[in-house]
């Protein structure tokens, strides 16, 4: 993941209301964040992530509003000052207890109230003297980036002195979330993207796959960087085994593919695609300590960004050709003419028009179910007509280029399909609305021995039926009476997977207070989500039998036999060793 903000990347803006706004930073454009205001995209280009910016007020001298980087001391000033005041007041004061043992207030030795409870406070809307029209007028004036407005609202509250320290901080925070014009720039990674879709978008598009379940899928599937894994050829020479290659059936819009690609180190584009002048200038600015005003840090370089990006972009080589990587790859099996990987756009990868320098261009492979099961019926797998060289030379440049393009496309499809059908993959990950029985029937034989199988489902019922197909009792019945699979009793071959398990995980937010500790009641519902895990095994061919005659002996006979053997061979017995010593 990159450390600074580059042009055309997707970022997440965390607004004062704790909501996220995911957008693309296009140079020379104006970004609007609703009621909080607007700013120029060039003002945050080249800046590090996780900085908090404040939108400055428009003045007569500047046509466009600028940004100010809010230092950490200012962000956490209220917290640090509040801790100091609270600790000082408690050390010098005493607590007055009521008859029921509840602490009502904290006072000093002089009787001055330092902290009180709000049990006698009555919230009255009339306590706020300022009307809504006056507040809207102050908002239109736009002074102090919202700080002056908040100060005037607090001053006009007639019952402010009756609030406790906690109630006052809560009231101030609520007004700051509503009127403070600040935002924090966050990088778009897989956990943030998942949280954003689950809370503010449509969770059903990703099968309600939560962050903790996505991490559990990646852990049980043992996905990791596989570029250094050993690659072994099959005994019959039809394909390879291992090499860090995983099969994926993804119907979450590419979220599972993005999570696995992040673990394999192939999700983010290299920094060499970005203008080097922008990176060098930003580093020099931060070394000089220029972190106050962020007005146009990258404006001088926005005009020549395209030329710099094109000059620094590596030329396509054989290693960067589409779907050409032999190891550390993901193979997506889809049911349509093109896979649905729309969420990969947030990581600057377009599956319909991929960039040759992006790692996913060569490490992400796609194959349809038709190409996997019956490649002869697929039109793309059929070889185009071969044109002799003498006739090819007579073609015009456009027709000749079209011929070579068709040949390259056929070679790519044939290579991926043949590799997929040969199998030898290190794992299988399934997140699909399809029946898992039909998927595993064709995908499990493509795995090598010891490969992990992980199937995600929003509901537990399909996975319970799947686990029953690989149970010990069903496997024993199948070994005693082998039948052709699939059939009514054995929809799947129960000898191919071992140790089927169903599990789930859910992280809940808790309120932790004395005597009132419980999960927060505002948590979203939805599907719980479950995963099925198992290990691919290679069953022994034929039957394993133990031959010979064995006589059951009693305990006394076993002791006599041991004594007899010790006398005959004292060197190999404990007694014999003692005598020899």
Image (cartoon, rainbow, N blue to C red):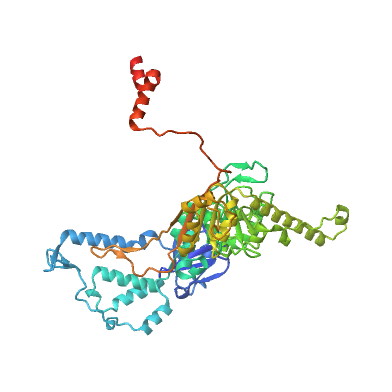
Q: How many marks?
A: 0
Q: Quadrant of the C terminus?
A: top left
Image position of 472 with respect to 131: above or below: above
Q: Position of residue 270 (x, y in %)?
A: 58, 53
Asked if residue 43 can be seen in this view, the reply is: yes
Residue drawn at point x = 54 percent, y = 71 percent: 30
Q: Residue at x 33, y 73 (%)?
A: 151
* Residue 142 or residue 51, whichever sits in front: 51
Q: Position of residue 101 (x, y in %)?
A: 14, 66
Q: In the rendering, at what x and y percent does residue 426 appear?
A: 56, 48
Q: Is residue 163 left or right of residue 233?
A: left
Question: Which residue of the protein is positioned furthest toward the top in this rendering?
Answer: 580
On screen, residue 274 versus residue 140, left or right, reads: right
Asked whether 561 or 30 is in front, the reply is 561
User: What residue appears at the point 41 percent right and 63 percent down from the top-left corner?
Assistant: 70
Foreground: 93 or 567? 567
Position in image of residue 432 (x %, y %): 54, 63
Q: Is residue 45 left or right of residue 369?
A: left
User: Which image quadrant for residue 230?
Assistant: top right
Residue 293 showing in the rendered view: no
The picture quadrant where one finds residue 247 is bottom right
């Amino acid at each position: 993941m990159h450390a600074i903000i580059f042009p055309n990347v997707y970022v997440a803006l965390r607004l004062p209301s704790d909501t996220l706004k995911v957008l693309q930073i296009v140079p020379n454009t104006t970004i609007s964040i609703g009621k909080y205001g607007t700013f120029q995209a060039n003002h945050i280009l080249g800046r590090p992530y996780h900085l908090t910016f404040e939108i400055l007020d428009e003045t007569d001298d500047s046509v466009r509003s600028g940004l100010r980087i809010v230092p950490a001391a200012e962000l956490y000033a209220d917290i640090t000052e509040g801790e100091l005041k609270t600790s000082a007041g408690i050390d010098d004061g005493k607590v007055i207890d009521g008859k029921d043992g509840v602490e009502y207030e904290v006072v000093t030795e002089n009787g001055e109230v330092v902290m009180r409870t709000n049990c006698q406070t009555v919230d009255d809307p009339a306590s706020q003297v300022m009307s809504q029209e006056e507040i809207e007028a102050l908002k239109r004036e736009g002074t102090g980036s919202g700080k002056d407005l908040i100060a005037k609202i607090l001053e006009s509250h007639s019952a402010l002195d009756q609030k406790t320290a906690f109630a006052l901080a809560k009231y101030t925070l609520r007004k700051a979330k509503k009127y403070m014009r600040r935002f924090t720039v966050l990088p778009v990674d897989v956990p943030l993207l998942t949280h954003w879709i689950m809370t503010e978008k449509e969770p059903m598009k990703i099968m309600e796959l939560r962050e903790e379940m996505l991490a559990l899928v990646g852990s049980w599937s043992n996905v990791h960087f596989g570029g250094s894994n050993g690659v072994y050829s099959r005994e019959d020479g039809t394909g390879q085994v291992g090499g860090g290659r995983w099969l994926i059936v993804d119907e979450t819009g590419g979220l599972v593919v993005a999570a696995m690609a992040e673990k394999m180190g192939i999700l983010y584009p290299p920094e060499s695609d970005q203008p080097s002048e922008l990176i060098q200038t930003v580093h020099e600015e931060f070394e000089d300590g220029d972190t106050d005003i962020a007005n146009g840090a990258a404006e001088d370089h926005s005009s020549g960004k395209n030329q710099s990006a094109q000059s620094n972009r590596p030329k396509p080589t054989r290693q960067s050709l589409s779907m050409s990587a032999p190891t550390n790859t993901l193979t997506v099996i889809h049911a349509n003419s093109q896979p649905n990987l729309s969420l990969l756009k947030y990581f600057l990868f377009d599956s319909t028009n991929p960039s040759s320098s992006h790692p996913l261009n060569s490490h992400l492979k796609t194959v349809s179910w038709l190409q996997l099961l019956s490649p002869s019926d697929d039109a793309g797998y059929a070889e185009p007509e071969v044109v002799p060289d003498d006739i090819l030379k007579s073609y015009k440049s456009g027709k000749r280029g079209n011929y070579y393009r068709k040949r390259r496309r056929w070679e790519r499809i044939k290579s991926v399909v043949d590799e997929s059908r040969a199998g030898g993959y290190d794992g299988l990950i399934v997140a699909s609305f399809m029946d898992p029985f039909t998927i595993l029937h064709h995908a499990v034989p493509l795995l090598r021995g010891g490969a992990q199988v992980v199937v995600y489902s929003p509901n537990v019922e399909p996975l319970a039926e799947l686990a029953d197909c690989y149970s010990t009792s069903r496997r024993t019945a199948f070994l005693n009476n082998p039948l052709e699979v699939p059939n009514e009793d054995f929809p799947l071959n129960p000898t191919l997977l071992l140790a089927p398990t169903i599990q789930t995980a859910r992280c809940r937010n808790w309120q932790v207070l004395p005597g009132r500790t419980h999960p927060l009641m505002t948590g979203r519902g939805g599907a719980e989500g479950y995963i099925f895990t198992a290990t691919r095994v290679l069953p022994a061919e034929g039957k394993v039998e133990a031959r010979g005659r064995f006589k059951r002996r009693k305990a006394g006979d076993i002791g006599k036999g041991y004594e007899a053997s010790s006398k005959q061979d004292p060197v190999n017995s404990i007694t014999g060793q003692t005598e020899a010593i």
